[in-house]
Amino acid sequence: MTHSRTALIGAIGDTHIALAVGDVDEMSVTQFALLSSADFASPMEAIARYLKSVPVPPRSVALAVAGEVTGESVAMAARGWHFSAQDIGAVLGTDRVMLVPEMEALVRFVPHVQAADLVIVNTGTPTPDTPVLLINCGNSLGAAASLGPKWTGPIVHGQVDFMDLPGDVHGLKGFDRAADLLTGPGLMAAYHTLRGAKANGSAAAVIKLGLSGDDDIASATLDLVARSLGQFAGELTLAYGAGRVFMAGTVASSLLPHRLEQFMQGFTAKGQAAARMEAIPVAIIKTAADAAMRGAAALFAARPEA
């Protein structure tokens, strides 16, 4: 009898919930669905709705979550959600549930990344046997780095909200830490500050407005965030001696493809290290939800009991 290697895989985020049936050996995905988190009172409600479209529900679950994972419990402060592996398992009638932090799942996706998953920021020249850096820029800010070649050595990862923001932010007050600016809420705060008044909407709306060319302040906000994100990524690259950089998250994937020049200005403005920075390959992971989902599948596949 062949043991099933399919699982319900997904990424539970503050904005979206991505779900699919995945083959954890082949890293293949079927029956993909992207749901709005705001439409549900809990992840369990979203999963229950999704399962109505799945003829044979999987008996295993692997989910990446954009929240604090403590053992088998999760707290997602932005949505006010608190749930456990048991809560998720009850929806499917299984106890085979893995919940992993989004950052850890993104790290595990990187070795499986394909050209189609990426937008190239800087082609550069890959340097063998150097650490790899991953920065996740969405509603929160996280970073991970391998401490050995590729992802074969020890890995450090976590939130970097506490880190200082390198360089000045055009005299804006209250933008001293990385998360003050380099997140969705930070982008909105910068737009409000430059505008001189608060406005309704979201970071996605400001990005859309800035890209349309109809709002000079929104456009200036995007320039500022892209350049500052480049500065920040450059600082971490030098700190870890990284030879390759990946950017992920909703802010990075929706903004940076349209502000590559500004990002690279910040990334390479490192004095005597400028030439070195210009040679480092940098790429954007197009869809963090899909990447985190597949990273969760990779982690699940690596479990001895999977």
Image (cartoon, rainbow, N blue to C red):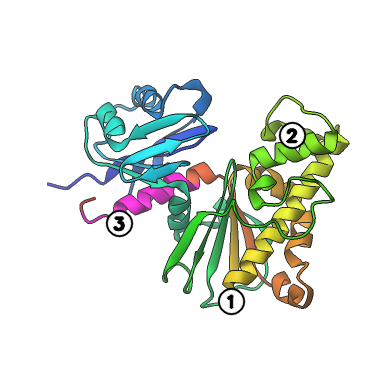
Task: Please tell me which of labels 3 and 2 falls first in the chain.
Answer: 2
Q: Position of residue 5 (x, y in %)?
A: 26, 46
Residue bearing the label numbered 3: 302
Camera sees residue 43: yes
SS of the residue under disc 2: helix
Q: Residue at point 57% right, 44% down?
A: 140
Q: Main secondary structure of the magenta part?
A: helix
- Whether residue 57 is visible to the viewer of this picture, yes or no, is no
Q: Position of residue 118 (x, y in %)?
A: 59, 54
Three-letter amino acid code at disc 1?
Answer: Thr
Question: What is the number of callouts on the image?
Answer: 3
Residue at (48%, 41%) from the top-left corner? 66
- Disc on res. 127: 1
Query: Looking at the image, is mark 3 or mark 1 earlier in the sequence?
Result: 1
Amino acid type assigned to the residue bearing label 2 in the image: Val
- Frontmost of labels 3 and 2 is 2
Q: Nearer the viewer, residue 26 or 190?
A: 190
Q: Quadrant of residue 210?
A: top right
- Identify which residue is drawn at 22% across, 37% down: 95
Q: Are marks 3 and 1 in contact (CB under 8 Å)?
A: no
Q: Position of residue 249 (x, y in %)?
A: 58, 46
Identify the residue position indicated by label 2 in the image: 206
Circle 1 Cα neighbour tier, 10 Å, few/some/many (<14 / 14–19 / ≥20)? some
> For the magenta stretch, what is the residue range?
291-304
Q: Is residue 259 magenta?
A: no
**Looking at the rendered structure, which numbered label has been put on residue 146?**
none
Q: Is residue 57 left or right of residue 161?
A: left
Q: Is residue 303 magenta?
A: yes
Disc with the residue nearer the chain's start (2 vs 1): 1
Indicate which label's residue lies in the foreground, 2 or 1.
Answer: 2
Compared with residue 158, is residue 10 higher up or lower down, i.e. above or below? above
